[in-house]
Amino acid sequence: MPGGETYRSAGVDLEALDEMKERIGALSRVTHSPQVIGAPGGFAGLYRLEGYRQPVLVSSTDGVGTKLRIASLLGHHESLGIDLVNLNVNDILTRGAKPLFFLDYMSMGDLDRQRTDSLLRGMAWACREAGCSLIGGETAQMPGFYTKDSFGLAGFVVGVVELDAMIDGSRTAEGDVLVGMPSSGLHTNGFSLVRKVFDIDGDPAVLYKRYDELNHTLGEALLTPHRCYSPLVEPVLPMINAMAHITGGGLMENLPRVLPAGLCARLEAEAWEVPPIFGIVQSEGNIDDDEMFRVFNMGLGMVAACAPDDVPAVVAATEGRVVGKVVGQSGEARVTIE
């Protein structure tokens, strides 16, 4: 019927979506390894698994949380693409897995080309650094569901490890040494608390405030990308008995997840340097120490347990430092900080 409703009049631009998919394809192809099968016109990404005796596929999915809000307010999105890849790659790294391929999901109200391109550039860059292929994903336009500056973002990674090389914590023993690897800042956790502390939603201008301790603005510090540990850790994976990615829940909740029953992580508070951003958040919000360690990574993005003889090699490879040891559990606490 002439003059009737169309998908475009409902807010969905199919031509723009097709153009966006072409740009996404061009960006993703630079990350492809020879194992990616580039069959045209398919509905799924294809990857040829080869060279393994007893392969175990290891997967993870996650998003960047309310860090999305900070990026939207500042109009800087590339670091979110980096975050999305790295936080998922770090998760499967704790099992000793090498990342094979990554997929993303983006949903938004309007097709902002600059924002989407920035996100994809970040993902492509991070995939290349981690050695995995960006082989697919989904971009959905959902008018009326999202406001102009809001959008949804999630990532999915699949990796592989030989069955006899998988890290499951079973080799961890009393006397193992804990090696902490520095974080680059908040990574992607605790942003709901940070937004409340600084009233960022009520006064976004605070993101442009400069702090002497940071040498740059608050917003720049908050958007520092989530660090990827895979290239550092891969050479010493056989020496690692357990490994925890310090994400939501901080050191207090993530370390117990990789320790066998009856063992406890004893950390030395003076053994590592806490980046200034954490002190600023704590001071501005009058937050007690227990809450800080329960919410944030506090400067340690990954913690590995290894035998004392392997410590020098693990420290050298990971740019880490000795932050404590594994001890027998004497009370209810699984993590103590002295």
Image (cartoon, rainbow, N blue to C red):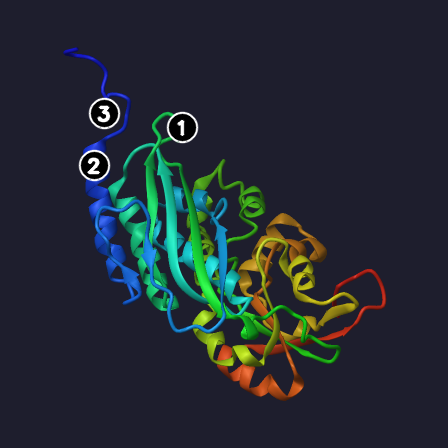
Q: Residues within 10 Å of mark 1 (few under 14, many from 20)?
A: few
Find residue 268 and name its label. none
Look at mark 2 in the image and give the residue it sits on: 16
Disc 2 from disc 3: Cα separation:
10 Å
Identify the mark nearer the N-term, 2 or 3: 3
Give the Cα distance between marks 1 and 3: 16 Å
User: How far across and how far down the image is residue 168, in percent?
Assistant: 62, 68
Image x and y of residue 337, in percent: 73, 67
| Quadrant assignment, res 84 | bottom left
Query: What residue is rendered at 23% in x and 43% in y?
Result: 20
Q: Quadrant of residue 176?
A: bottom right
Q: Quadrant of residue 99?
A: bottom left
Q: Does any portion of residue 226 appear in the rendered image?
A: no
According to the picture, the residue beneath numbered tag 1 turns out to be: 145
Q: Is residue 154 left or right of residue 181?
A: left
Give the mark nearer the N terminus: 2 vs 1.
Answer: 2
Give me the disc on residue 8: 3
Mark 1: amino acid: Phe
The single residue placed furthest to the right in the displayed view is 330
**Secondary structure state at the residue bearing disc 2:** helix
Which residue is drawn at the image coordinates 31% and 52% (left, top)?
A: 120
Q: Is residue 323 visible?
A: yes
